[in-house]
Amino acid sequence: MDVIYCRSRYSKEEVGCVQMQELLARADIISVHVPYNKKTHEMFDEQVFNKMKRGVIFVNTSRGKVVKEEVLIEFLEKKHIGGALLDVFKNEPKVPAKLRAMSNVILTPHLGGGTKPGRIACYKMAIANVMAVLEGNRPLNPVNDPFKIIA
C-alpha cells in the first residue's frame, strides 16, 4: 500500500507528505491524529467529508471533538463514508445511539491502544528513558528536548 499523510507544516521534500486536499481525494483510509484545540474543533465537517473519496474508511483515535459527529453519521448512512473505526467521541462516555447501531462502524471505549503487549511496550519505553537520563544520557523519546543546546 502507498502511505500518504499531511501535516500542519507541509513539506514537499518529505516522501509521502501531501496537502490535505490531495489526501482527502486519494486516501482509501483516513486515520486522524491531531490534538484538540480551537483550530481542530470539528475540522472534519460536511465540507471535509464531501472531499473524501467515496467509500473511504474513517478512523479517529485522536479526539472526539475534532469530528462533527452528526455529520459523520449522515455520511455513514448515505454510504459516502464506507465505514468508521472510532475510539473517541464528542461527548465521552456517551456515544450516539445511531453510531452504536450501525453495522459499518466499530467502536472502542478510548482504549484502542490498551492491549497487554501495547502497555508492556510503553512500560519498557518509559523505563529505558528513565535509565538513559539517570546514566547522564539524552532520553530516547523526548516530547520536548531539554538537552538541546541553543547557540
Image (cartoon, helix red, strand yellow):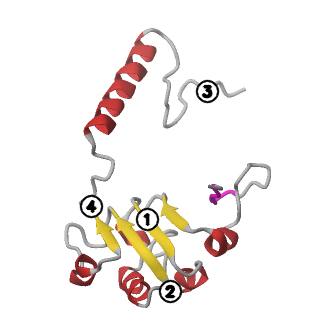
Residue that label 4 marks: 108
Q: Nearer the viewer, residue 27 or 125?
A: 27
Name of the residue lying farthest toward the top: 135
Task: Identify the amino acid type marked 2.
Answer: Glu
Instruction: Name which residue lies at 27% across and 52% down.
Output: 111
Check the image and report above or below for 147 versus 42: above
Quarter-of-image position of residue 86: bottom left
Local SS, label 2: helix
Instruction: Looking at the image, tell me whether mark 3 or mark 2 is earlier in sequence order.
Output: 2
Local SS, label 3: loop
Residue that label 2 marks: 46
Residue that label 1 marks: 59
Q: Nearer the viewer, residue 92 or 117?
A: 117
Quarter-of-image position of residue 119: top left
Q: Position of residue 62 (x, y in %)?
A: 41, 59
Instruction: Name which residue lies at 43% across and 70% down.
Output: 66
Q: Nearer the viewer, mark 3 or mark 1?
A: 1
Task: Identify the amino acid type marked 4.
Answer: Thr
Instruction: Looking at the image, tell me whether mark 1 or mark 4 is earlier in sequence order.
Output: 1
Q: Nearer the viewer, mark 1 or mark 2?
A: 1
Residue that label 3 marks: 148
Q: Position of residue 26 (x, y in %)?
A: 66, 71
